[in-house]
Structure formats: structure tokens, C-alpha cells
């Protein structure tokens, strides 16, 4: 079971992700598109990057139940810690959406992820986008130390291009907590099932893809999967 500090870190990290990411979408809606899709994508990517470096050494900065689930499947995170992490992440998302509702009470969706086309289309793209995300997370956070220090940049970049691609189609969730918070607080629950199922299916697919090119490696339970590499690593000659 994880300690109190990692759970608090996951709560705060997910709160910040949802507050900044969906908050940028709300501001865009209420100010004649001033933020733009590019701005929203950058908001999500940059806040994920920031949280990785801020809390990565405390909790691993999963801030996403699908990522935690994928790390468990890849044997890099203990199954016994999955439920507490997911609960902390979901509570953080709900708290962020509640805060945004207080700031923007007239906004109908609070940045909820909603399909622009058919539910099947959104389900499929969420599976693929989440698979890409988990695949990248597994590869940049396990391997050479030189890549570890830039893991936050790489993961933030993936989030950014995925929002640019999938945002107009499915809302580009890749994160069940990110979809849960706005949907519950705004009452827009009719399509929530897409984002609570496709993201976990995508995480499993991402783990399978990673295992096709790498041998599974088991990291210590205390390791921070998304944390920067130690500063005292040996230099290459």
C-alpha cells in the first residue's frame, strides 16, 4: 500500500491537470476561442510536463488511472497500490471540476470530453491515443538514464499532439479521471462510458506493444516511473 504522501501528490497532480487543462477549454469557450485548440493542447502538455518534474520523485506522477493500470500490467507498479492511486486521482479530478464550476457556473460542460461523431469512432480513437501514451511512458521511463531526465518533455509532447489530433474528434481524454471530473460535476454522463473503458483498453494495448519490442522489466515498487534520473549519473566518455 502506498503511503500518504504519494496519494496526496497524485491528488494534487490530477487536480492541477484537470484545473489547468479543462480550465483552458472553458476559457476558450467563454472568450470567443481566444485560447484555440493549439493553446488547449499546449496547456495539457505543459501541465503534465510540470507535474512530472514537480511530483515525479514522490508518486511517479501517474496522474492518470490508465497509466497506473498500464504500469501494473507491465509489472512496474504493485497491484496493491492501484486502487488507492485511482481513488486519489479521481478525487483530484472531481475537486478540480468543482472548483471550475464555482468559477464558471454558467458553463454547461466544464470541459467534459464528448464525441463529435459516433461513439464508436470516439471509442476507437481513445483506445489508440491511450495506447500511444502508455507505450511512450513505458519506453521513456525505463531504459537509459540519459532519456530519463527528458521523460517529462517527451510525455508532455505526446499529450500535446494527441490533443491536437483527437481533441476535435473525441475530446482526447486518454485519462479516465480527466473525463470523470467534468462529466460528474456538469451532469454530462451519457458518453462517460467511452472514456472509462477505452482508456483502460488502450493502456493494455500499449503495454502489449511495448513488450513486442522490449523484454518486460520489473522496477522496484518504490521507484518513481516518471521521475527524472538522478543528477549524479556517470557521464559518457
Image: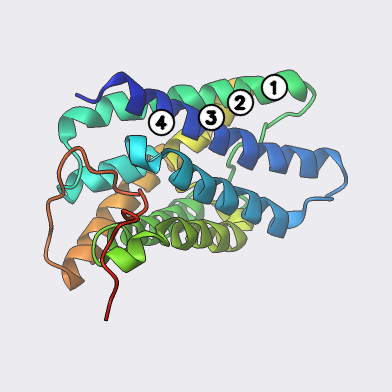
- The residue identified by callout 1 is 101
- The residue identified by callout 4 is 10
Q: Nearer the viewer, residue 147 or 169?
A: 147
Label 1: few (<14), some (14–19) or many (≥20) C-alpha neighbours in 10 Å: many
Foreground mark, 4 or 2, reads 4
**From mark 1 to mark 4, how far is it between C-alphas?**
21 Å
Tell me the tag on residue 213.
Answer: none
- The residue identified by callout 3 is 15
Q: Residue at x 17, y 28 (%)?
A: 80
Q: Residue at x 28, y 76 (%)?
A: 236
Q: Residue at x 35, y 35 (%)?
A: 58
Foreground mark, 2 or 3, reads 3
Q: Nearer the viewer, residue 51 or 164?
A: 51
Sequence-wise, the earlier of marks 4 and 2 is 4
Residue 153 place in picture, x, y as percent? 49, 60
Q: Nearer the viewer, residue 156 or 41?
A: 156
Q: Nearer the viewer, residue 50 or 86?
A: 50
Residue 64 visible in this rendered orientation of the protein: yes
Label 2: few (<14), some (14–19) or many (≥20) C-alpha neighbours in 10 Å: many
**From mark 4 to mark 2, how far is it between C-alphas?**
16 Å
Disc 3 on helix, strand or loop? helix
Label 3: few (<14), some (14–19) or many (≥20) C-alpha neighbours in 10 Å: many
**From mark 1 to mark 2, how far is it between C-alphas?**
6 Å
Disc 4 on helix, strand or loop? helix
Sequence-wise, the earlier of marks 3 and 1 is 3
**From mark 3 to mark 4, how far is it between C-alphas?**
8 Å
Amino acid at each position: 500500500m502506498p503511503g500518504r504522501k504519494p496519494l496526496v501528490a497524485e491528488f494534487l497532480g490530477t487536480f492541477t491537470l484537470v484545473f489547468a487543462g479543462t480550465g483552458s477549454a472553458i476559457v476558450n469557450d467563454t472568450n470567443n476561442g481566444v485560447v484555440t485548440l493549439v493553446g488547449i493542447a499546449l496547456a495539457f502538455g505543459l501541465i503534465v510536463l510540470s507535474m512530472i518534474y514537480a511530483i515525479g520523485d514522490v508518486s511517479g506522477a501517474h496522474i492518470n488511472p490508465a497509466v497506473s493500470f498500464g504500469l501494473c500490467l507491465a509489472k512496474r507498479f504493485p497491484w496493491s497500490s492501484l486502487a488507492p492511486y485511482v481513488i486519489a486521482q479521481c478525487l483530484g479530478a472531481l475537486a478540480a471540476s468543482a472548483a471550475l464550476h464555482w468559477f464558471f457556473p454558467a458553463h454547461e460542460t466544464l470541459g467534459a470530453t464528448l464525441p463529435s461523431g459516433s461513439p464508436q469512432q470516439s471509442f476507437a480513437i481513445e483506445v489508440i491515443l491511450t495506447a500511444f501514451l502508455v507505450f511512450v511512458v513505458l519506453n521513456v521511463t525505463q531504459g537509459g538514464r540519459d532519456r530519463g531526465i527528458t521523460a517529462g518533455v517527451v510525455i508532455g509532447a505526446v499529450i500535446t499532439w494527441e490533443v491536437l489530433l483527437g481533441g476535435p474528434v473525441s475530446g482526447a481524454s486518454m485519462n479516465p479521471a480527466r473525463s470523470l471530473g467534468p462529466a460528474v460535476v456538469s451532469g454530462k454522463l451519457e458518453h462517460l462510458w467511452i472514456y472509462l473503458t477505452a482508456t483502460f483498453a488502450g493502456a493494455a494495448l500499449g503495454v502489449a506493444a511495448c513488450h513486442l519490442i522490449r523484454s518486460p522489466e520489473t522496477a522496484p515498487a518504490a521507484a518513481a516511473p516518471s521521475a527524472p534520473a538522478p543528477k549524479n549519473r556517470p557521464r559518457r566518455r
